[in-house]
Image (spheres, grey):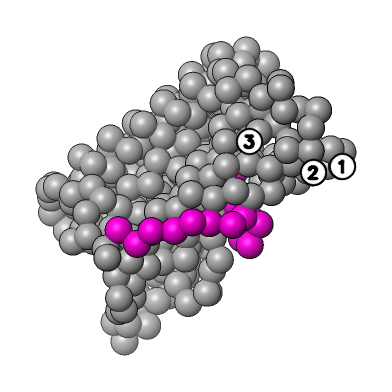
Amino acid sequence: MNHFTGFLKRGILTLLFLIFLVSGQPPAHGFDGQNPSKSQKVLMTNLAGLAAITVWGTANWDYFSSSPATGSEGWFSENTKEGGADKWGHFYFSYGLSHLLAGTFEDWGYSTEKSARLGALSSFAMMGYMELGDAFSDYGFSHEDMIMNLLGSAAGYFLYSHPSLSEKINFRIEYIPEFDRADVFTDYENMKFVMALKLNGFESIQDSFARHFELQLGYYTRGYSRDGDRERNIYLGIGLSLPEIFSGLSMPKISKFFTYFQAPYTYIPLEKDLND
């Protein structure tokens, strides 16, 4: 009966989280009953994000189920819980969230620089709140996670506010789900984290065929979340630059998608298992 109740609770709270995502636009009226100002929209967006994190964390990460705890999880060594993949997860999600929010704020009329700053600060606030929630769960508060949140948000600010640099460097995630876990955000067993150097970002290459390619540096772990031989893999690769290819085909939305998501099987890697 307790198992069924827990399953039902998770299902209901997950449904509420999805409702938050679908209806994520700020209310049509501000605090004074008038159309909300830009600053009110930013505040309401942050409050909605914190509420969504509370719902998801309670449903999937057992927030508020234990007394607060803190400790060191380590970084990228073989004997850490996820082999460091979780640390790159914090970096990537902080980075990606900062760009998502910055793009939204820029659409509301903020300058590129201020949108980047507000996006990075909002991202760090939300991811920091998530880590505080972890303190009241079996995960515990991790200062390593907070540092990676800070670095991801800072990278998000720097690249968003320097478009010429973001044309050269992308941070991405590759994810091939097996659909056997409800919480996709911590399914590190099926993720890879990638930094891509796009050759089309360099003026001397933009008119050559080489602009369709990019160099990649990737990291992923296997066997940590599930029983099996543990691997910590790093790779150097050369791959197709899908953002450039789809941009050349006048498909800007698809090009934008592949700026943040790495398509599997579109690169040739030279891999090294650090556990060997």
Q: Is residue 162 left or right of residue 256?
A: left
Q: Which residue bears the numbered disc 3?
A: 198
Residue 269 appears at what percent x and percent y? 53, 56
From the viewer's perspective, is residue 255 above or below residue 2?
Answer: above
The reply to whether the C-beta atoms of the residues labelled 2 and 1 are less than 8 Å apart is yes
Alpha carbon distance from label 3 to label 2: 14 Å
Farthest-out residue, bottom = 1
Q: Which residue bears the numbered disc 2?
A: 246
Q: Secondary structure at mark 1?
A: loop
Between tags 3 and 2, which lies in front?
3
Report the quarter where the C terminus lies.
Answer: bottom left
Q: Which residue bears the numbered disc 1?
A: 249
Residue 107 seen in render: no
Question: Mark 1 packing: few (<14 Cα in 10 Å), some, or many (20+)?
Answer: few
Q: Residue at x 57, y 42 (%)?
A: 215
Q: Is residue 28 left or right of residue 152?
A: right
Q: Amino acid at mark 2?
A: Phe
N-terminal-most mark, 3 or 2: 3
Residue 211 seen in render: yes
Q: Which residues are magenta?
A: 260-274
